[in-house]
Image (cartoon, rainbow, N blue to C red):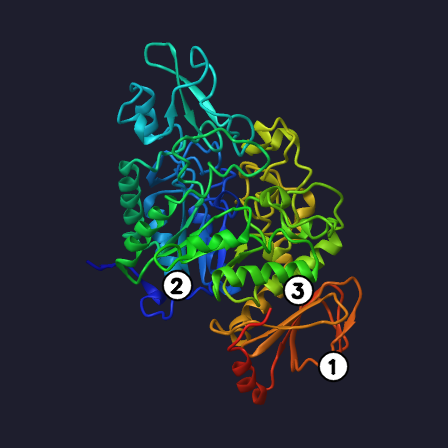
């Protein structure tokens, strides 16, 4: 049976779908921090609707909405208590339906965030498990195990939580005795489901269908590599990646079922996975034709500002995913690009295996340098084959807020690490919309303070201050998105241009060329490169023969060269 999903407005006859085509530009909305409509200091669906047109005008194809389901907000929505309800802080189901309709009218697809690895400890299933006996149907939905030791006083194994501390919490049984332990890969308020239980799989198929029937176009899958654990739950031998906790072969059965469900709709639904693995090469198993359409390739995100390392990461991404990787340089879990690229990183350090830690480094920041490099990195990202995911605020050039007061921080990573890890609050500070006002336009006048405090210097990054500034980061993003499809078509293959002197990263694709100068000094355009006319540069430029330091430059081939370049693009060289 083929199901027809609602597709009002401009999407009804929109073809092809850039999500399914693999080349979409997706704007990530961290709803709590996007825009507040009712003055409670927390972003909401109505606030997003107020400014949705600005995302469309930027040139994006879709939005990815971080979790807005009912939740106690211990991990700001990644602890879901009801998968079929909107959290009252954000609005109602009617507000959500109105958002989907408005987005579709603007030509934007809507992706939701599916958190199926774990739920909230307030979820009705887990509450039922707490009041049920060991071995019950209720407990079988989760990973409850007896403890070790003479009285079960020790955890079932030695696994550590991603957020710090042990990954097991002991419960008190209904009769008051110390009882079994339950597993949580993250916070104790986020118990993991047992995906080896068919009842769990059936429930989530129903949840997906619930949102698909409301017009949602697809899902970003949280912790897509972690939903199944090794059946024996063996101790971790130490030394880095816990292979028994992640990337189990049975996880692919989940995505084959989800893909079949999504493909039963007309038009089909889209799935992209968050897959953090020690090697980019391991992503390929998730991208088989009957599984995920795409999986985030984080190999580019964690590289230092070096032509060789970036080129190697791009080659690996293309090798694994073909012409359609899902690239990102930032998201709600890592430090912002302007900060990361302003930190020094030794090229002697090998490519990271702990990618998240590599993207949350501490240390001095040269913010001017980092901002310049971040703009150039955006130019590289948007010229590559595949989809580009843009995290809110990157188009404003926002840096990480590293100096939040201890008492303001709310991330479980900060709390569970005892303050040794900064966590993710610094990239989640509410957006500055105007350069004046107590919340910089995030909330209406006379509102509660934003849920995370905005530093005074955020005013200099406000959207209204950048709107008409031809040299602003916002203007650079608009230009990049405007020229992206005319220069670099979705079917165009990347062909490298070699730089004998080093420091340049350059390739041709479609009707254009992308040249990144990763050095701290201007470089001349190599005369042997047939680049055509420069269309844009991420930094001011006065001489057509010069590539400014730390800049990305896009060129358009003369029309007579287009046929030749297309013929050359039939192969990819590395």
Looking at the rendering, in which quadrant would you find the C terminus? bottom right
Picture coordinates of residue 442, whole percent (x, y): 55, 46
Q: Which mark lies nearer to you, 1 or 2?
A: 1
Precedes in sequence: disc 1 or disc 2: 2
Rendered view: 270 above or below 548? above
Would you name the residue on which mark 2 appears? 20
Relative vertical location of residue 171 with respect to residue 369 in this rendering, above or below: above
Secondary structure under badge 2? helix
Of mark 3 and mark 2, the one earlier in the sequence is 2
Q: Nearer the viewer, residue 200 or 388?
A: 200
Identified at 56% across, 30% down, the residue is 164
Residue 91 coordinates in the image, percent (x, y):
39, 42
Asked if 456 appears above or below 376 in the picture, the reply is above
Question: Which type of secondary structure does the marked residue at label 3 adopt?
Answer: loop
Residue placed farthest to the left in the image? Answer: 1
Residue occupying the far right of the picture? 521
Quarter of the rendering containing residue 500? bottom right
Number of the label disc, if any, that sits on residue 527: 1
Residue toward you, 544 or 183: 183
Residue 470: x and y, percent?
Answer: 66, 67
Q: Which residue is mark 3?
A: 469
Q: CA distance from mark 3 to mark 2?
A: 35 Å
Q: Are marks 3 and 1 in contact (CB under 8 Å)?
A: no
Find the distance from the CA under tag 3 to the CA under tag 1.
33 Å
Q: Residues within 10 Å of mark 1 (few under 14, many from 20)?
A: few
Picture coordinates of residue 187 (x, y %)?
49, 30
> Mark 3 against mark 1, which lies toward the viewer?
1
Task: Give the class, few, some or many, for how many residues have Cα within 10 Å of label 2's Cα (few <14, many ≥20).
Answer: some
Q: Residue at x 60, y 56 (%)?
A: 300
Question: Mark 1 to mark 2: distance in Å?
Answer: 39 Å
Residue 222 in view here: no
Q: Nearer the viewer, mark 3 or mark 2?
A: 2
């Amino acid at each position: 049976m083929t199901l027809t999903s609602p597709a009002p407005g401009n999407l009804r006859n929109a073809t092809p779908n850039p999500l399914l085509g693999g080349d979409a530009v997706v704007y990530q909305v961290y709803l709590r921090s996007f825009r507040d409509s009712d003055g409670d200091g927390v972003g909401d669906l109505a606030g997003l609707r107020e400014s949705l047109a600005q995302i469309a005008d930027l040139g994006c194809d879709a939005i990815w909405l971080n979790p807005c389901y009912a939740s106690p907000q211990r991990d700001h929505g990644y602890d879901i208590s009801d998968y079929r309800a909107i959290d009252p802080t954000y609005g109602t189901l009617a507000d959500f339906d109105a958002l989907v309709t408005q987005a579709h009218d603007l030509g934007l697809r809507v992706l939701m965030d599916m958190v199926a690895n774990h739920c909230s400890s307030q979820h009705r299933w887990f509450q039922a498990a707490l009041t049920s006996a060991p071995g019950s149907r209720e407990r079988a939905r989760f990973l409850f195990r007896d403890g070790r030791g003479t009285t079960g006083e020790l955890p079932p194994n030695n696994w550590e939580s991603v957020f710090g501390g042990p990954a097991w919490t002991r419960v008190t049984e209904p009769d008051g005795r110390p009882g079994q332990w339950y597993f949580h890969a993250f916070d104790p308020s986020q118990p993991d489901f047992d995906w080896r239980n068919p009842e769990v799989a059936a429930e989530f198929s129903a949840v997906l269908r619930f949102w698909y029937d409301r017009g949602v176009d697809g899902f970003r899958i949280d912790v897509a590599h972690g939903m199944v654990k090794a059946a024996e739950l063996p101790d971790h031998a130490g030394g880095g990646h816990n292979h028994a906790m992640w990337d189990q072969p049975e996880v692919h059965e989940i995505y084959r079922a989800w893909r079949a469900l999504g493909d039963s709709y007309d038009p089909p639904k889209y799935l992209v996975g968050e897959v953090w693995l020690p090697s980019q090469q391991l992503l390929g198993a998730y991208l088989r034709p009957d599984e995920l359409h795409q999986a985030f390739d984080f190999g580019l995100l964690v590289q230092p500002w070096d032509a060789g390392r970036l080129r190697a990461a791009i080659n690996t991404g293309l090798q694994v995913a073909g012409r359609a990787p899902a690239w990102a340089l930032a998201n709600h879990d890592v430090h912002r690009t302007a900060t990361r690229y302003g930190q020094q990183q030794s090229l002697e350090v090998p490519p990271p295996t702990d990618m998240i830690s590599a993207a949350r480094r501490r240390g001095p920041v040269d913010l001017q340098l980092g901002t310049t490099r971040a703009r150039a990195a955006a130019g590289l990202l948007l010229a590559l084959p595949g989809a580009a995911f843009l995290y809110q605020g990157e188009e404003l050039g926002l840096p990480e807020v590293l100096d939040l007061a201890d008492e303001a921080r709310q991330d479980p990573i900060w709390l569970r690490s005892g303050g040794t890890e900064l966590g993710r609050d610094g990239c989640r500070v509410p957006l500055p919309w105007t350069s004046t006002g107590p919340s910089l336009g995030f909330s209406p006048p006379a509102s509660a303070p934003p849920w995370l405090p905005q530093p005074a210097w955020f005013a200099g990054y406000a959207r209204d201050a950048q709107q008409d500034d031809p040299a602003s980061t916002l203007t650079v993003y608009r230009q990049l998105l405007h020229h992206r499809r005319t220069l670099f078509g979705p079917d165009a293959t990347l062909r490298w241009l070699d730089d004998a002197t080093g420091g340049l990263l350059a390739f041709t694709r479609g009707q254009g060329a992308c040249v990144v100068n990763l050095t701290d000094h201007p470089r001349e355009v190599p005369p042997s490169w047939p680049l055509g006319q420069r269309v844009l540069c991420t930094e001011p430029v006065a001489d057509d023969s010069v590539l400014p330091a730390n800049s990305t430059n896009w060129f358009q081939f003369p029309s007579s060269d287009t046929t030749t370049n297309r013929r050359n693009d039939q192969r990819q060289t590395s």
